[in-house]
Structures are given as structure tokens and as C-alpha cells.
Amino acid sequence: MGASPPTLPNQLSESGSSIKYLPRPSQFTSGPSLPSQDADSEGPESFHSNEPFLTREETNARMQYWRSKANTGGYGADTHIVDPLAHYTWLEYIERDVVENSEFFFCHGAYSLEDDTLSELSAEERKRHNIGDWIWIMRPSQYGTDIRVATDKEHQHTRLQLSSLWKSYIIICRVLLNLEHLISAEFCTSFYTLLVRHPEEDVAELFRIKYGDVVRFKTDIESRIIDIFDSQRTWKEVTLSLSKSISGVLEDLLDIMGHPRADSYPEFSLFSVLTCRMKVLILDMGLVSYVGSHGSTLTASWIASPPESPLALIEIRSFDVGFGTVTCSLQPLACLRGFIGGAGVWVFDVTRKKNNVEYVYFSTGLSILTHVTDFADTWGPIWTVPAAGGMFGRVQQYNIGRGIIRPIDDQSKSTLTNGVVRCHWSNPSFKIKDEGSSTFTNSPRSLGPDDRLLIGAALEENNNCRYTLAHYEQDYGQDMGYLGTISDRWSLDARSLGFSAGQYINLTASGTQKKVPGVTLKEAIWNQFSQSPQSASIEWLNNFIGVEISHCTGNARRVRMKDLLCTERVRKRINRCHPGWETTEWGQMFSHALDSEDFEAMRRLWQEHPHMREPIAGIIAQMLQLLHLTGNQGRCLIAAYFKDNMDKHLELDIRGNEWGMNLKDSKCSATYAIIGNICLKDSSVSSGTSCTSRLAPTMLQMRINFRRETPYPDDSVKLRSTDQLFRVDRRRGRQITLTPIGTPFGRLRLPHIYVAMEVLEDEQYGSRRERFLALFMASKASYGGMNEQRRTVNTSINPDEQGTQDQRRNARRRARIASQTEQSLAQNDVQDVPAEVRSRRRQHHQPHNQQIRRKKSPSSARSCCFL
């Protein structure tokens, strides 16, 4: 039996990481390149800085905060949804930890089977790597006096074996330490995976490496080292023992690639220890690949400075031409390339020979052979859809982060057997259906829990099809628009069953959201709320991922998703599809929590009434469907417009509303945009947009913070999430106005910039970062965001209409948002700047050397806010 995973302290329980590092060579830093605690003293940074926005302490504190909330509330943490910036920064630090403590990093990416160089390790370093003193004394010394007397030939041969084994032993200790770090950080469970290519087919198999196997491999190497110093054994017995395979670990992997086993080599050769080294290097490179979900772009910046072009091929080579070379190369996938994205995945293979010349095989598209549990661990999470007809334990399809995996009818095209089922990944593009509709069709095949999935089936022609293009035009002609280009859009309909999804979808999700694939925040929210409502976190409703665009001025502001659901027309839309929902017990409590100014009411509802989660999630999921395609769609900004009996959308041209570039969907940001019945005006600018039809620039209000020092007027700011550049037009306390820098010439003249990040979360997590209320201005004037003047101008208000219930609710909501804005700004008041910091800032800002202070009065907070 393999050893069980270690019980280690949780990574997030300390301010730093639990992993320890070997000393770096002189050309590297002494550890991961983390921001120092006094990073604010470093001033502005260069345009190409890739330093994480959050420090390690901030990241760990935020992750711990959400996990604590989830444990208290009895639901999943869902950090990739409620705090995506912290989640993906955490993954970035995890990847740094593993890469910078790997042999891949120490050898600069140039693996060699004959490199036996050993560096001295202190007692503390040996303790970190769990290397006991009892075995450390058996290392090969500089003068060779530590091996018992033997002939020169025997002595030389054994010393070579001992040196090779010791280098392999140090590497396997690092691999084991890295794997224990991933387990303690809850990045994985008791195994990791790597991809290995089958020689006969364009198939890459997800191969599982168990923690217990790595421990056994380390123990086997220790045993062979001890054999060399065993005086009870003859030299022939020792060398014969070393000639045999040192460990059975990875023998199956070598068989898949077609590499010969160590047992097939001549006796008394070094091929056994070379095979041992090759195995530990595969384990090392495999873990580097795994921590990036086998899809990270491994640039030379990991191993050299300055950064160079991305690596595409890594070789594990021997000077012995008869031994063979193992490669790890970026290979494209077949149908799954639409799911994984990027340049491909890292796949292990052996070099081929043609006319006595070695070459590396690059596929046009590899299929993936895997068990569903390994797929979920590597690229999860996954949700299962049970097969129809009461087939217990059988699965109709797997829903993944983007798209679906289903078995195909024809299973005769592959030579692989032993429970292999050919499947195909697809991402169908259908219109979002109304509630209760379904696009699932019963497949003649179903999947079992032990089936191996071969994902990558090719499309085939069906010559018996009777559906013609004329039929197609007759069915869908009314939905066709003018020919043009649109951005790729992810569809929900092929995965959902509308409001009644819970009775069909298995509510068990597996796998942790990793770096690859880059599932957007919108997709992650939809996946969790539509398919696992019982374990979903409700915290994201308090995040500023909604956008309310003024129907009057064209100005926009970020709002909490909870407040977006409270708007008059969104409420009417919910009532239209679910009449009477507010009369139910759960509806009354949910409605009260939405209207409450304190989000604790929503938390208590979600925590104390788990049986109400599914119907509440159903209503929210339907609104997510309707608003899924809103936001930045390339050349236009799409916003929903709800009317009495129909749902419409409006396309705003990005040109003239450049702030819409800040609203791109990504893994860390989402935008659910609506046209609101509200007038938003910047009262601090006399020429700002107002209730008239005159030309004026529009603007977007959102919350941001800065990584280091904060800028002053005429400074340059880069928004980290979109890489958009802006100039500071004015600043008053923690209110700042920014205008876009659009010309390439203007960008070239920016040696230093201040990096900012949008703040979507309402919680502070005890962070010392200053939060700013930022107004992003458009570059030119427009008619309320539109290119044409209003056809009908009527800004009068009928006093008789102000007493309606909906208008009163709207007024309360606006007052609540304004009050929350004032409170947020008041709590984050700008303090006096220390004299030494003030002096340093004067050197950077000679034209603006007057200290800027914020007036601590409610009127100053209102002067730059949308009310």
C-alpha cells in the first residue's frame, strides 16, 4: 500500500507559505520575487511589470477570509467567483513556489541525465527536504574515501552510480516537497497528473502520479545507496543489483511511450541509474506542467533574465545516443482545444528516428484519454447529468466549465480497448430558451464511472441527411443578421434545463478551478448557481459586477449585483416569469434580504435556510441567462432593456464610450449591464452630461485601488485587468477622474505608470490599500452615449406619478447606494502624508508639489459621485 498524504499545516493559516526553498544560484533571487512590505516606497513601476498585484500576505488573508465565511455558512468557498483576483493570484504564487523549487528551474530548463553536480546542503536545508543525517554521511565525498576498498575499476564504476543516485535523490526530495506543498494548500488531493503520448495514435493519456508512489521511489533510491555501503554483499552482487530497475514507478508510462525498460539493458551497465534519473526528471517536469494545468506558457523568464520567447520543447537527453531522448513539448488538442485554449498542452513523448535522424513528432490535434476523476482534478470542476431511463449510476453527459462532453454513437474508430469510450467535446451555440425548455436529447450510449474517456472524436459526414440549406433558411432565416464579425460567445442552453435544472442535474461537483482553462467569471457563476446551488456561495451578490447605465445621460456606474436585482424593471421581469414568487415563504425572505441595506440578512438567509437555496438560485440563474451576453462585446457595449412583455438589448458604440473597454469579461471580472431608469450626473463638472440633448462626454464610475503609491494629476495609470492607459485629469481626496490615452505616440512617452486594479468586492479584509472612487471619462462628446441626437426630448416629471410603489422603491434604492458610497469614502479617508513620502513625491511631481488633502465633509463626497 502507498503511503498516505502528509498532514501539514494549512498554507493559509500563516502569513507566508509553508514551503521552504533551496538556496538559489547567484544569478537568482533568494526566494520567490514577492513584493516587500514597504513596497509603497518603491514609487511608480515600468510598463512591463508582471509582479502580482496582491502581496502574498494579502492573498492568503483574503483566501482565508472566504474559507472561514464558507465554513460558517455551510457552503463552498467559491473563491474563484467571490474574489477572483485573490484566487488567481493564489494560483500564481502556488505556481511560483513549485517552479522555483524544481530541477527545471535550477538547470535553466536544460535537463541532462549525466549531470551529477551536487551542492552542499546545510543541516536546516536537509531538514526541509527530509534528508536524514544517517543517509547524508553516505554521499560521495570529494576524495572518495567514503567507499570501502575495491579495485580501481569497481571503485570508479560504483562512484559513478553513487553520484548519479545522489543527484536523483535530491531531485526526488524536491518533487516530494513540492507535492506536499500542493496537498497542504488544497491545490490537489493525493496525486497529480501528466500527459504522455501514445506512439501509435494521436492520443495523449492523463497519467496519474500518486503521492505514495513518489514516497516509494524515494525509499527505493535510499535502499540502493545503502546497498553500496553494505559490507555483507560482494561487489558483483552490488553492481548486479544496481543494474536492475531501481523502482517500478513510471514503468507503465515508459511502456506507453515505447521507451525500453531498465531490465532490458546489459548487466553491469549505467543504464539503470540513467533510467532512474530520467524518471525523476519526468516527475519534476510533470509537476511543473501540472501546477499550470499543463497549459501554462513556460517562458525563459522562469530560468533566465531578461524574459525571452515562450518555450515549446524541453528535452531530457543523454550523451549516450543509444539511450533515447524524452521530450516534453507543447502539442495542440483536437476538439478540446476550444476548451483549453492557448498554444496547447505539455505532453511527454520519445523522439522518433527516420533515416537515423532523431526528430520530434508534432501532432495536428491530440485526443485526450482519461478517467473523469483525473480530468476533473486537472481541468475541473465537472458536473454529471444522469442518464435517462432510470439507469442507476450511468451518466448521459458531463458538463464542464465551458461546454459538454458526450459519448458518440460510432465506437469503432479506435484501436484502444479496455473500457475506452469515444467522446466528443462541444460548445453548441443556441439561443437561450425560455424557462423549462430543454435541448437535451437521449443518446443511445451512456457512461459508467469506471469508463476511460477518449475525448477528441472527429466529425464525420452523414450522407443520409435530408435536411437542406433551404430547410435551414426556412427555420432560421428570421434570426439572420447582416454579414460581419462577432466575438466568440459561450452558450448556456445546451447545458441547462431552465428553472427546473435541479431535478435533473447531479448536484455534485468535483475538481478545483485551476489556471487553465480560462473560464470567465460569468461562466463560473453560472456553472455554480445553475448546477450546484446547494453548495454555492452567495457572497458574489455583494460584489460590484452589475453596471447600471443611465437612460438619460448615458453615464454608467458599477453596482452590487444585489442592487441590480432590486431595480424596478428587473423585478418586473422576475414577476412576469414567476408570478407570485414573493408570496411564498422563501420569496418573502429573499425579497426582504434583497431590499435590506445590510448584506448580513442575505448571509443569514443562505446559512440558516439551506432548503431555500435551490428555488432562490433558480430565479437568479434565469436572470444570469438573460444578462449573459451583456457587457463589452468587442466593438460595442451591450446592455439589457426590459419592457413589459419583451426583453430587448441596446448596443452602444465603444467609440465615444471608451470606458466600456473596462467592462470586458474575464476570469477576474464580469459585467451584467442594464439600461436603468435613473439620471446619473457628475455634479462637479458644469459641462457634464445632464437632462438635455446637447453633446457631452459620458463616464463610468467604479472603485479602484493602486498597488503602490497613488497618482496625481497628469500622471499615467494602467488598469491591470485590461491594460488600458489613462491620464489623471483631477483628484480630490479619494475621488479621481481619468481620461483615456489612445494614441500609440502618447503611450511611448510613458516611462513609468501607476498600476490600478478594479475593486469588485465590498469587503476590505483588513487591507491597508486606499480605495478610490474613479470616474473614467470618454474621449469625445456624444448624445448620452449615442451617435444621434434624441428624437423626442421630454425631461419633465409628472408629480402625480411620483407616488407609485415602484418609484418609491427606486428612490429608496438610490438613496441606499448613495449612502453606501458616502460611508465607504468616509471610512477610507485620506490621512496626512508623512514628510519623507511628501518630499519623495515632490521629486516625481514637480508641477504638482502641493499636498492634496481630502475635505472630510459629506459634500465633498457627493461632489464627484453619481447620485
Image (spheres, helix red, strand yellow):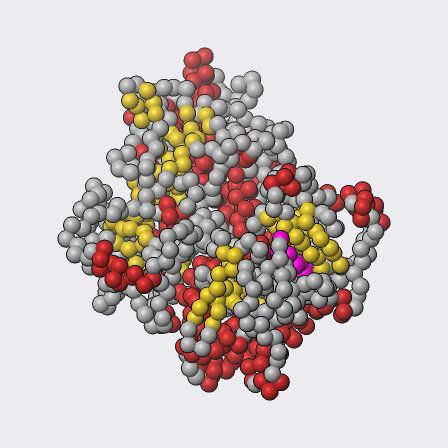
Q: Is residue 179 above or below residue 638?
A: above
Residue drawn at 55 percent across, 67 percent down: 790
Q: In this view, does 632 lie above or below 836?
A: below
Residue 198 is drawn in which quadrant? top left
Residue drawn at 41 percent across, 50 percent down: 485
* In this rendering, position of residue 716 left or right of residue 853: left
Query: Does the rendering let one see residue 712?
Result: yes
**Labels in figure, total:** 0
Residue 460 in percent (x, y) is at 22, 47
Residue 576 in percent (x, y) is at 42, 79
Is 108 one of the magenta-colored residues? no
* Residue furthest right in the image: 835
* Residue furthest top in the image: 152
Residue 52 in percent (x, y) is at 60, 46
Residue 213 in percent (x, y) is at 40, 42
In front of the other: 364 or 394? 364
| Residue interval drawn in magenta | 772-779
Residue drawn at 37 percent across, 45 percent down: 337
Quadrant placement of the C terminus? bottom right
In front of the other: 240 or 53? 53
Query: Does the rendering let one see residue 67?
Result: no
In front of the other: 716 or 86? 716
Looking at the magenta stretch, what is its main secondary structure?
strand
* In this rendering, position of residue 715 left or right of residue 315: right
